[in-house]
Image (cartoon, grey):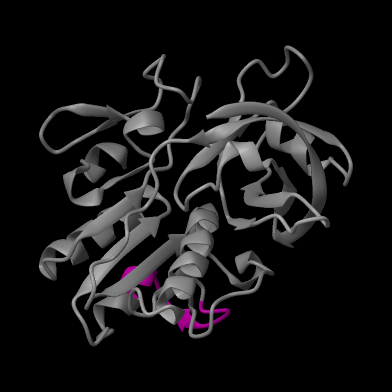
Amino acid sequence: MKRFDTTVTSIRPVAEGCFELRFDWPDDAGVPAPGRFFTIKAGGRYDPVLRRPFAFSGYAPPVAGERDGEAAFIFQVRGRGTEFLAALKPGDPLDVLGPLGRGFGKPPRGTRPMLVAGGIGMGPMLYLAAALGADAKAGLCEAPMLVIGVRSAGFIPDVELPAGTVICTDDGSSGFHGTVTEWLAGFDPGLPPVFYACGPAPMMAAVDRLAEVRSAPFEAALEQWMACGVGACAGCAVALKSGRYIKTCVDGPVYDGRLVDWGAAL
């Protein structure tokens, strides 16, 4: 974990109300793993007071003599903090703290990584898809399958998607007409599946039920409000089926989805 000042390299709209922002990532902050996150000071010195957490949607390593590393994230405009970020321009400064939290694990050999993204939860899944795609080319795992669920075609991200990505829309305006779990229920991955998912609680609960039916592992990237982002305040507590609670920022955000009480999150 490192706090550093950096610079916006690019920002552009990628879907209705959503933007992709890229910024310089220093070498001494380490390579951010898929599933981990960072926080940004989104506003003036004291307003808003709290930093804003975001998951990495991509990372490009530095090129010697040409450029620094570059990190990316996708965000939806929802309030003052994200309105501030949406108004930034290339060259503007950013105050960043990261990388934070726990990332995704590697799939066991002989399994099919099934990546499920819903809404703004697509960011970390895009990064994981790229990382596992590279691992598959190197013979380290099987090729991942990415399934994205959105309300309508206007929310499909204008980003490079892996070959074979499945799009599901609630209104049938693009791709499969229905939810990601409805599509997954009829799909044969050809190998024992390993589920990775990030999205709204109802989708995550449905993936949990599907993983249980198929006796499959399930790694969940938790989406939760955060205050400190470093485990000090317990503002991001999530209930487990055991009755215990975990802190999303330090125990997650990636956690065993089979242990999470998704009913409490609905």
Q: Is residue 115 left or right of residue 78?
A: left
Whether the magenta-drawn stretch holds residue 178 is answered as yes
Where is residue 139 shown, x and y percent of the image? Answer: 37, 80
Q: Residue at x 18, y 77 (%)?
A: 192
Closest to the observer, 30 or 56: 30
Q: Is residue 206 left or right of residue 32?
A: left
* Span colored in magenta: 172-182
Where is residue 98 shown, x and y percent of the image? Answer: 56, 33
Kindly give the residue lying farthest to the front in the view shown.
65
Regarding residue 53, the answer to whether it shows in the image is: no
Closest to the observer, 141 or 72: 141
Regarding residue 122, the answer to whether it shows in the image is: yes
Where is residue 92 shown, x and y percent of the image? Answer: 87, 37
Quarter the C terminus occupies = top left
Q: Is residue 79 above or below residue 129?
A: above
Q: Residue at x 39, y 75 (%)?
A: 144
Q: Residue at x 19, y 64 (%)?
A: 211
Q: Is residue 128 left or right of residue 247?
A: right
Where is residue 145 shown, x and y percent of the image? Answer: 40, 77
Q: Where, by quadrant of the figure, is residue 186 drawn? A: bottom left
Q: Is residue 97 above or below residue 134?
A: above
Q: Residue at x 25, y 37 (%)?
A: 264
Q: Where, by quadrant of the figure, is residue 143 drawn? A: bottom left
